[in-house]
Image: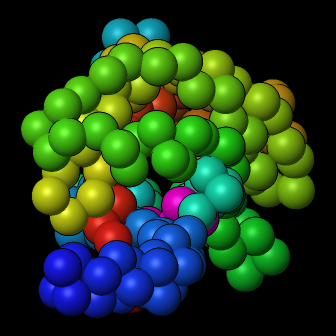
Amino acid sequence: MLKHSLAKLALVLFAPLLALNTAQAHWMLDNEASTLSFVTTKADNVAEAHTFDTLSGSISPSGEVNVSIELASVNTMIQIRNERMQAMLFDTPMFPNATITATVDFAAIDAMAPGASATQQLSFTLDLHGASNSYTADVRVTRTQEGVVASILKPVIVTADSFGLAGGVEALREVAGLSRISNAVPVSFTVTFVEAD
């Protein structure tokens, strides 16, 4: 009886602390386990896949998602092309990062059993080159022991015109001596978040 009473007392005393710790938990983006890629098309039918190699971000206990893309980390597998994109397209000294923001149901995702997954429609905002546009995408969310993995199911089409980048695309076309570079770019991502202290 005494043990039972002590156990109940401990539960009453420590439950608020446990709840506080849970409320303060949040997830940080794992760059090594995350990818963001985009496809460019030149000369009408030559498509090439590229990535950004440096991502950072978090999901707060209130469900606020923030992902920062370091634009200077663009990786096209050709160094001179990387440098041209940094200088002529993204203007990385002036605009070093692009940012994705969204809101998710943190409690619902946190309550998923490890290994469980679900598809949900996610609305998010992309801030790039001083402009902001909103998108909607179907995302597969998978709970892991350490956090959560979110993968877009179909690429989102981002257009250069929407972010004032058409002039940069034209400059790249001219310097490369190409007949055409498409202004529409499919973008895909898989991002992994792990629980942080």
The residue that appears at 80% across and 76% down in the rendered structure is 94
- Location of residue 143 by image quarter: top left
Who is closer to the viewer here, 74 or 78?
Answer: 74
x then y, percent, for residue 157: 57, 20
Task: State left or right for residue 33 relative to residue 171.
Answer: left
Magenta stretch: residue 169 in it?
no
The residue that appears at 39% across and 85% down in the rendered structure is 9
Residue 159 can be seen, yes or no: no
x then y, percent, for residue 103: 67, 43
The residue that appears at 57% across and 40% down in the rendered structure is 105
Residue 27 can be seen, yes or no: yes
Task: State left or right for residue 61 relative to residue 193.
Answer: right
The residue that appears at 32% across and 22% down in the rendered structure is 118
Up the image or down, 15 lies above or below 162; here it is below
Q: Residue furthest front?
A: 1
- Location of residue 61 by image quarter: bottom right
Who is closer to the viewer here, 67 or 84?
Answer: 67
Who is closer to the viewer here, 99 or 148?
Answer: 148
Up the image or down, 188 lies above or below 182; here it is below
Who is closer to the viewer here, 100 or 64?
Answer: 64
Query: How many numbered tags mark residues here?
Result: 0
Up the image or down, 2 lies above or below 11; here it is below
x then y, percent, for residue 44: 45, 11
| Quarter of the image with the C terminus in it | bottom left
- Please provide the residue range marked out in magenta: 55-60
